[in-house]
Image: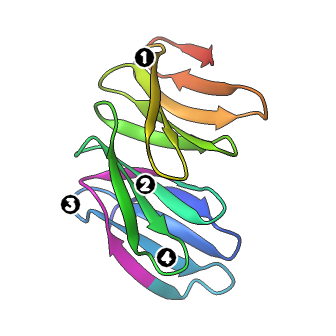
Amino acid sequence: MNPIGLAFDGANIWVANQAGANTVTKLRARDGALLGTFAVGVNPVGVTFDGSSVWVANQGSNTVTKLRAADGKVLGTFSVGSKPQFIAFDGENMWVTNQGTNNVTKLRACDGARLGTFAVGQLPTGIAFDGANVWVANNSSGTVSKL
């Protein structure tokens, strides 16, 4: 299964299963019961909840998959940069770190439309939204970018 990324949707834990599984698993938080396993892109890494949907960064297919949190139905798959890692939600948009292209892709959460691509440091990995800005941890350059 090779779990790597986790997200909480208010009641459940979503787990990205990397290295050949190409799935996410939904576990009930109160007791760990398995509620489902859902196919996504190749090598899923980061998982984020936006209030109604779960977003998964698929490192091996250079995409992000949007799933309905209620039942895991795929609502869309969207192209981003090379080797997407983790995702942050700013209340309206999804921000995805792309390690292979040293940038961040901004997608509109309601429909996945690409709103921009922003250069950051080398091997961007972690990402967070502080209420006003997006912060990116650049693993190889030893820096943090503020967008």
What is the distance, in whole Å, between disc 1 and disc 3 at their CAs?
26 Å
Query: Which amino acid type corresponds to the residue marked 4 in the rendered image?
Result: Lys
Image position, residue 114 (x, y; %): 42, 35
Kindly report the secondary structure that dominates the magenta region of the rendered protein.
strand
- Does the residue at mark 4 contact the one at mark 2 (Cβ under 8 Å)? no
Mark 2 crowd level (few <14, some 14–19, many ≥20, 10 Å Cα):
many
Mark 3 crowd level (few <14, some 14–19, many ≥20, 10 Å Cα):
few
Residue 108 colored in magenta in the image: no
Which of pointers 4 and 1 indicates the residue nearer the eye? 4
Q: Which residue is mark 2?
A: 56
The earlier-in-sequence mark between 2 and 1 is 2
Quadrant in the picture for the C terminus? top right
Residue 40 colored in magenta in the image: yes
Q: Which mark is residue 26?
A: 4
Query: Depth check: 129 or 44 in front?
Result: 129
The segment highlighted magenta reads 36-47
Which of pointers 4 and 2 indicates the residue nearer the eye? 2
Q: Which residue is mark 1?
A: 140
Mark 1 crowd level (few <14, some 14–19, many ≥20, 10 Å Cα):
few
User: What residue is rendered at 56% in x and 24% in y?
Assistant: 137
What is the distance, in whole Å, between disc 2 and disc 1 at their CAs?
23 Å
What is the distance, in whole Å, between disc 4 and disc 3 at their CAs?
18 Å
The earlier-in-sequence mark between 3 and 2 is 3
Query: Which amino acid type corresponds to the residue marked 1 in the rendered image?
Result: Ser
Q: How many marks?
A: 4
Image quarter of residue 30? bottom right
What is the distance, in whole Å, between disc 4 and disc 2 at their CAs?
13 Å
Image quarter of residue 70? bottom right
Q: Which residue is mark 3?
A: 20
Image position, residue 18 (x, y; %): 31, 57
SS at circle 1: loop
Quadrant in the picture for the N terminus? bottom left
